[in-house]
Image (cartoon, rainbow, N blue to C red):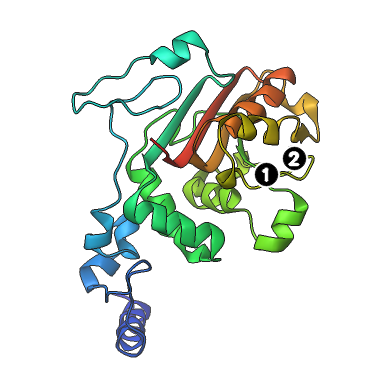
Amino acid sequence: MPSGFFRRVLLKGALDLIFPRRCLLCGAFLSSLEESPGRGAGRDICPECLKEFIPLKPAYCLRCGRPFKTRIASVHTCAHCLKKPPVYDRARSAGLYRDALRKAVHGFKYNGRTEMSRPLAAFMAENLEPPFYPAEADLILPVPLHHRRIRQRGFNQSLLLAGRLFASQRGLIRHDLLLRSRWTEPQVSLKGRERLENVRCAFALADPGALRGRRVLIVDDVYTTGATANECARVLKQAGASQVLVLTLARVC
């Protein structure tokens, strides 16, 4: 083994003694097993908290990703999508927006816990499949924030998630194409029809020609009613996108 390897091991051991790693959610000390590389979200979140991350398993609508109330694997189009198909082609979420995952998203998004992006992206990677991950797309577009929101929050959580999750496909990520063209109220404070009206005509494209004939993957943090996803997809389809997929970290049931 090269001497540099031993120096890194000794340095890591010393740092662990002085600054022991803690779970980003509950603060519990992480063992060397949880800290070891290759364990995804478990590198930063303890096993007890990870147990509360509920993956969305194959019992969901093929079109909108709505979870079915069954434990039997069943992937087909739900009655809602058959009656009123969404603008986008398919949507998929990695997990359910509840318990520890909801707490993690809230801390990440509203409390500036940007370090949460690593375990959250790892959780997505562990619970997704093509065409969502790895992305079978020509462009990966994080849902944009208005410049006022960026100044308030300091970052775009969807862009951070996309950068972490698609590190090996970073060249496909474009944050300069899909733009938030007007200020909107936070969707979390609105319901039903209000959400639709809130995001209507809220997005625009910097270069519409760049979308013609392209397969696009939209990335966002939480799917609630699908209003934001549909409005983004409408703009992209009008510009000639051949396919629009929607990927979110979590989904409200």
Q: Where in the figure is residue 15, as x and y percent of width and height?
A: 36, 86
**2 sits left or right of 238 in the view:** left
- Residue beneath the point at 74% across and 40% down: 179
Name the kind of residue labelled 2 in the image.
Leu
Residue 144, numbered label: 1
- Compared to 17, does 53 lie above or below? above
Q: Which residue matches tag 2?
A: 179
To which quarter of the image does residue 8 belong?
A: bottom left
Nearest the eye: 39 or 66: 66
Residue 52, numbered label: none
Q: Where in the figure is residue 220, as x and y percent of width and height?
A: 55, 42
Nearest the eye: 78 or 125: 78
- Residue beneath the point at 52% across and 50% down: 161
Secondary structure of the residue carrying numbered label 2? strand
Q: Are marks 2 and 1 in contact (CB under 8 Å)?
A: yes
In three-dimensional space, the C-alpha distance between marks 2 and 1, rounded to whole angstroms, equals 6 Å
Residue 139 visible in the shown view: no
Q: Where in the figure is residue 242, as x and y percent of width and height?
A: 62, 17
Number of residue marks: 2
